[in-house]
Image (cartoon, rainbow, N blue to C red):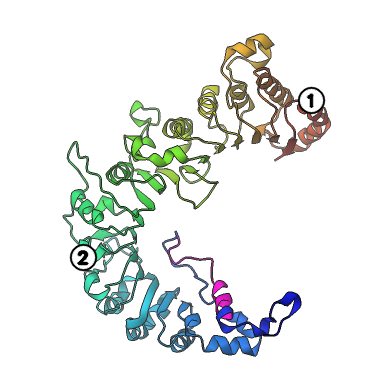
Amino acid sequence: MATGTGGFPPIHDLPNEILVNIFQMHNVGYSSLGHKHRPHARYASRWYPLMLVCRHWRDMALVTPTLWQSFDVHNNTAWLQLAVDRSRNAALELYFHNREVAIDSIPLIVAQAPRLRKLLLPPLQRSDFRAVETLFRTTMPVLNELRVHLEPSWKDFTPPHWISVDSFDACFPSLHSIRFENMAVPWTLPALSRMRYLALRNCTALNNDLTFDQFLDVLEGCAELEDIRLHGFLSTIAHRVPVGFTRVVDLPRLQKVTVSEPAALCRQLLSAVHLPPTIILRVFGEIDQDLDPNDDDVQSLFASMFPEDLSKLPVIRSLKYATVDCAGDGIKFSLCSASHFSRNPGSIMLQLFWKQDMEVYIPRALEEFISLFSPAPLEDVHISCTPDSVRDTDTWTLIFAALPRVHTLTVLPAQLLEPVWDALAGRHLPLLQVDEDAARAFAPVLLPCLRTLQMEYLEWDEDAMGYILESMRRRKMRGLPKLDELSIAFFAPTDGVEQVQEEELDRILPFYEESMEEFAERFVWSWT
């Protein structure tokens, strides 16, 4: 073979097998089992522009069936027919994104049923039932993934027409991944025993009398199950269990659990399934009652979603990175063992939704975070709160005291300056009223491993930097090494004075930068 620069063959002389791999790698990046419940483009045909490189590449692509077997169907049925023809006898994977095109293509889908391997349909309407029903009466021997999403009708208040799919075992013998929404599903062992991926959103069981124990009977028989996602399914079955119910099912291949149900049902499911230390756990709890957050009975909303015995969650002991988001939709805890937003095994996301304003619950939520995850060896913590939601030093002290291994801490918005910096100093007395000897003995050291500290939205006043500097001096008195980095961003509490205060900050900060060199290798400040 001729060689080009560096001894490699010229690109136009690459073997077809390598070219096919290059074309297929151009599609990598999206999984058909993505976390969204609506179909998204798979970019299964993203390689098409490569046919324009040269005639050889185009000719090779046109006669390679495997390049045409996975296809995103948008508005062009002509391209769909072209892909069906050029894929020849290769297994087909069709991802539809247009309802009208999907319905019009059902005769073609049925005709290709013997080689259809994946079928993902877009949101359908109640009027499409007759057409879609044909699919569930057609044998598809190699179909392994199916997604059907039925839109409920909002024109009236009657329940939508549920599509019944009680012929799985006969028509879909290879099916192992399903994602259904607003459908009635056969919660039976013959239908589900082969499942590896099971996602049900707002679905019901065909058996209206299904009990929680019967639900577990079928679940226990799904020995191949790796990923289960239940959104509003448990609340449709007879989920009440007798007092003292302690059954636990073991799913040997389970890797991920996502549950979005009322808080009590989240706890019930997580208590009844063995969760390995490497589990990826996503819990979305709903509180649908009018509750007073100051009531003693409403002090453990997050804990009410977890098993009472936290030893059933061994994953907690591997979590090193945590984000507490109290500024978004609901309140959310995200923790993982590898890095923020990691997809590696071993992570928990816990989110609470309440029809009332969650802001009043933020201080208690932070306390719950510490209570639930104190066994975790956390090293990197990010806390985001709404302005003025945490106004007392005791809450911050409780949080910092429970984070002895943390080396990176981000707090935004930190809001009032005094409470959080009093807590960082390790005591409650006003900072400027305690001498050096008293500071060493007054309180235990908080955050002894801290190396990087970032705070944003600190309220600015003329004493702000002096207060921060004194807090850092108190930490040094207790024998703590200087930080690698301290980053602070201020905001003006009163409209119309930002320019004046920014000029003041520009004037005095150089003095404090020099003083801060004693406590931080790198000091960064900004104005937000």
From the image, tell me which residue sits under label 1. Answer: 515
Nearer-the-camera pick, 293 or 72:
72
Residue 257 covered by magenta stretch: no
The location of residue 391, given as percent across then percent down, is 55, 26
What secondary structure is found at the residue carrying circle 1?
A: helix
Can residue 290 be seen? no
Depth order, front residue of 431/59: 59
Apparent side of residue 187 relative to residue 295 in the rendered image (left or right): left
The region drawn magenta spans 19-34
Q: Where is 337 relative to 136, above or below?
A: above
What's under tag 2, amino acid-wise?
A: Pro
Check disc 1 and give the amino acid type: Ser
Above or below, comparing residue 433 to residue 453 in the picture: above
Q: Is residue 527 left or right of residue 347?
A: right
Residue 394's x, y, as percent?
52, 22
Whether the residues at callouts 2 and 1 have beta carbons within 8 Å, the answer is: no
Residue 25 drawn in magenta: yes
Viewer-nearest residue: 133 or 247? 247
- Left or right: where does residue 183 sit relative to residue 242? right
**Residue 169: image x %, image y %?**
23, 70
- Depicted 510 relative to depicted 26: above or below: above
Q: Which residue is mark 2?
A: 190
